[in-house]
Structure formats: structure tokens, C-alpha cells
Image: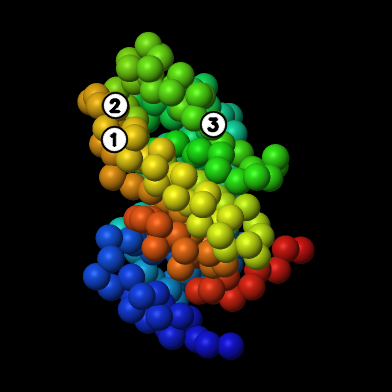
Amino acid sequence: MSSLKENLQYFDKILDGTNCKLIAVSKTKPIELLQEAYDLGVRVFGENKVQEMATKYEALPKDIEWHMIGHLQRNKVKYIAPFVSLIHSIDSIRLLQEVDKRAAQNDRVINCLLQIHIAEEESKFGLDEQELQALLTSDEFKSMNNICIKGVMGMATNTDNNEQVRKEFASLRKIFDTMKKDYNGDNLDLQEVSMGMSGDYQIAVEEGSTMIRVGSSIFGARNYS
Ligand SMILES: *Cc1c(COP(=O)(O)O)cnc(C)c1O
């Protein structure tokens, strides 16, 4: 297996000259390993559990950007609201309202991505295009002053069929481009398309990703015990 340093150098190299950033997905990995990545220059980590992210935030240097990439429950937003840099997984107006409220309590604006359902699988979270439109045109959304929508996030179907994955990523990019054309407002600053993981980041970059979320190809396979 290649080392953490080699893996990070590899991603540096393939993203060099692109408009795409690396989110190092460190879920389930111990703090010492994150510190090692930090010492090698990583400043953006992705986590999918609120408690784990809060614990790691407390333990590690404060110039790290913490990205919440997993499904987020409303009753847990308050634990990450003081420090989270970007929430990738907004999938309802009610969740966004809670983020707005907790951001206001912390006297800050929290950057968010809207998670769009692009996969064939039923189980993946996310808004469909109709729900996206309903959210963006709602009065509730327009009155939110403590969130900023930076773009969209999506997960492709977990399949070996690269053409299907490509089609799904292309559809997310198209939704983003249309959104950018059709909507504007003080709480919108559309720049990011978060798509691509260890198994499909190459296709995602080709299809216009601006953030790939990579875990196992950097840190090695995860053990869920
Ligand atoms: C775990 C996870 C990733 C990274 O997965 P790898 O296959 O390990 O790269 C990316 N995005 C989300 C939403 C995840 O939960």
C-alpha cells in the first residue's frame, strides 16, 4: 500500500491546474492520522458524524476547515454550528432553517451545499429538481440571512458502469449551471459542485467537479466495527 504522503502527492498532482479541490474524508480515522495529514499540509477534512467531527475539532489545530458531508439531523446542528466551514448535505428546507437559526445564534454565516439526488438508488438522500426549485423560490429561503448556498453536492450510483456514473455527474453539473443562471440573492454565491469519491473522482473531475470527497484512497480502507 502507498503511504499517506504519496497518496496526497498523487492528488496534488492530478488536481494541479484544475478548478477542483480535495476534501480529505477522515471519518472513522484516528486523530493521530489526521494530525499526520495536517503536518503534510491538509487543511480541509470531511466527516459524516456530528459527535466525531466535534471531538476532532477540539483536538486538532484551529485553522482546519471542517466539512460535514454526511446526513445531518436537525437536532444535532447546534453542535457543529460554531465552527463548521461547509455543510454539503442540506436536503430539506427545515434543515436549512435550523442551520440558519443556529448560525445566527453564533453570529456567523454558515456556507452550505444543497444535496441533489442523482443516483438510481432509492437509498441515497437528496432533493430532486422540483424540490430544489421549491426550496429556492420559497419565502422561507429568501428570508434566511445566516446561511449562504455555495452550490450543490451529489453521489453517483455505486456501479461499475462508468457511463452511468458519467451521466449522473453531468446531470448534477447541468443542474448547477442552470441554477447559476436562474437564481440570485444575498444568500446565494454559486461556485461549488461537490462530486466524486475514491471510486469515481476521475469521472467527476472530467464532468466539472470543484470538490472531490476522497477517503479510502488517501487514508486506506475503513474498518467499521
Ligand atoms: C465516506 C464518504 C466519502 C468518501 O468515500 P471514499 O469512497 O472512502 O472516498 C465521500 N462522500 C461521502 C458523502 C461519504 O460519506
Residue 11 is marked as none
* Nearer to me, 30 or 220: 220
* Image label count: 3
Residue 1 shows in the view: yes
Q: Are marks 3 and 1 in contact (CB under 8 Å)?
A: no
Which residue is identified by label 2? 183
The residue wearing badge 1 is 180
Local packing at callout 3 (Cα closer than 10 Å; few below 14, some 14-19, many 20+) is some
Q: Is residue 44 left or right of residue 167?
A: left
Residue occupying image coordinates x 28% and y 66%: 18
* Helix, strand or loop at mark 2: loop
Mark pair 2, 3: CA separation: 17 Å
**Where is residue 59 shown, x and y percent of the image?**
46, 60
Q: Quadrant of residue 184?
A: top left
Position in image of residue 127 (x %, y %)? 54, 32
Q: Which image quadrant: the N terminus?
A: bottom right
